[in-house]
Image (tube, rainbow, N blue to C red):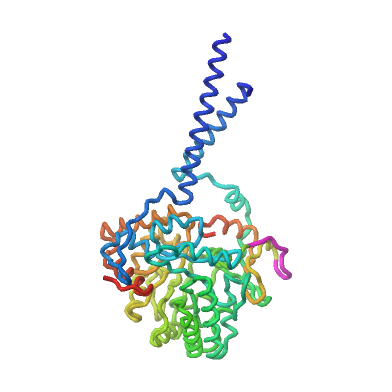
Amino acid sequence: MVKHKKKRWLDAQKVFVILLLIIVVLSALSIAKFYGLLIPELPQTIVHGNTVYLDSMSLETKIAQMVVVIGDRRMITPWKNMHVGGIHMYTLPTEYIFNNTVIDFQYNQKIPFFVTSDLEGCFNPFSRFRNFTAASEVTTLGDAFEKGFFEGEYLKSLGINLNFAPVVDLNDSIWKCRAFPGDVEKISKLANSYVLGLQSQGILATAKHYPGKTLVVKDPHKFVVGAEISNDDILPYGYLYDKGGIKAIMVSHLITTGSIDSQGVPSVVSPKVIQDIKDQYPGILVISDEIHMLGLRNFYQNIDEVYIAVFKAGNDVVLNFDRDPNEIYRMIQIIRDAVARGEISESQIDESVTKILKVKGFNVA
Amino acid sequence: MVKKKTLIIVNISLGFLAFLLLLSLFDVTIPSLGKAAFVVDQSDPVCLVSWNGEFNDRGNLDRCCLEAREQSSCRRTQTPEGQSDIKWVCGEGGTNVQYWLNAKAYNYCKQQVIW
């Protein structure tokens, strides 16, 4: 009886040790998965001097180059392993952390990341350290240039190279500070001066939110709303493009009619809207709105369909701020599979990646 | 020396923990308390933006969450004068926009993958 009891006690101890070992292993795997360490490194691209050999890029690497993710330094390893195209910077506690985060991300990168921000003035992720003039308070071309210059100078000091500004919407009835004042002609000129100032510091500007009316329409009960677009709404884009400064346009999630008809779907997933942009403004980078902001749950069964729709529509750069690197990797694989079955053409991917690399300063062979 | 009964209870707990870790490795998640709080709260989510002392309804809650998260960290606050039910503010104020959320909106934002 005593021997039997002793045996059962020893069995319980063995089970304890085994379970403890299992938990240690599973915990290690869970932590590795959380930080994206189980994601394999995608093949390296061949870069000689200033030339990128497109054929050396795997399809997954090309797709990844089209994606801008959140610049969370905890995910630095998976973002670098996936060779994503860019990182977006939210607010951080100190300028030192901003700077070091960007330096660590860019370290040893054959193809540098886009490092993006949303600095518009009153809309300011750096408000802890620095204030900037609101667009609504800019009335002269000199002020607009100065605004761009000082914002660009500051962004450059932090290592940011692509800013999602200027807003060229004609009206802002919600914030009252994000749009330039005046009529469409004045807004276009102010925006152009801003772009000149920003880009004098080497920061790329992004005109947004195509095709307009994003700062006026709202429906608290819906995630996606519609708007009628006039010729005036899109005039600033043509003006900026003709002046030669603007390199990127961000497309909104509005369903539009009128001068720009998105054909019943949000603009950013409308192949017609995206193709119109590419036809009107050749060479410009088409950047999507953040992929989870699109309210597309009303149109699609699941997030996989949203991913495919955004790429299929023809966006060159897709913003996906999901912090889970495993989900980003899954998105890349979904798009890869869509290309493999012919739903998205590889030539479209190649065209977008070529544009991206050229904007980053490379020759593409 | 640990009592046998205690060890058995510990083993059962460890077994349960191992099961949960295995589920999480295969992306099977358990609803969090935050999600429960969101479901239980029957009020409407409220997101206001303010600049220069003027408040306006942001409308689109998803965009509110992203914009609020981008600008600054959020902190608990007293409800501003003239408003009701606001519990959180995101942003530094001054010449910068601020986002004001009620508990429902804040809990919604916390569930978003971009937050």
Residue A349 falls within the magenta-colored stretch? no
Q: Residue at x 38, y 60 (%)?
A: A83
Side of A332 relative to A70 (left or right): left
Q: Can residue A220 be seen by looking at this rendering? A: no
Q: Is residue A121 above or below residue A106?
A: below
**Picture quadrant of residue A210:** bottom left
Residue A127 point in image, percent of width and height: 61, 72
Side of A48 relative to A100 (left or right): left
Residue A38 point in image, percent of width and height: 41, 48
Secondary structure character of the magenta stretch overall? loop
Q: Is residue A345 above or below residue A272?
A: above
Residue A202 point in image, percent of width and height: 45, 78
Count of labels in the image: 0
Side of B41 relative to A89 (left or right): right
Q: Residue at x 41, y 76 (%)?
A: A248
Residue B81 falls within the magenta-colored stretch? yes
Image quarter in which the N terminus of chain B is found:
top right
**Picture quadrant of residue A174:** bottom right
Q: Residue at x 57, y 47 (%)?
A: B32
Residue placed most toward the observer, A76 or A283: A76
Image quarter in which the C terminus of chain B is found:
bottom right
Please state the extent of the stretch shown in magenta in the rendering.
B74-83
Q: Extreme top residue here?
A: A1
Residue placed most toward the observer, B9 or A109: A109
Q: Is residue A59 above or below residue A36?
A: below
Q: Residue at x 55, y 83 (%)?
A: A147
Residue B34 point in image, percent of width and height: 60, 51
Q: Can residue A251 be seen by looking at this rendering? A: yes
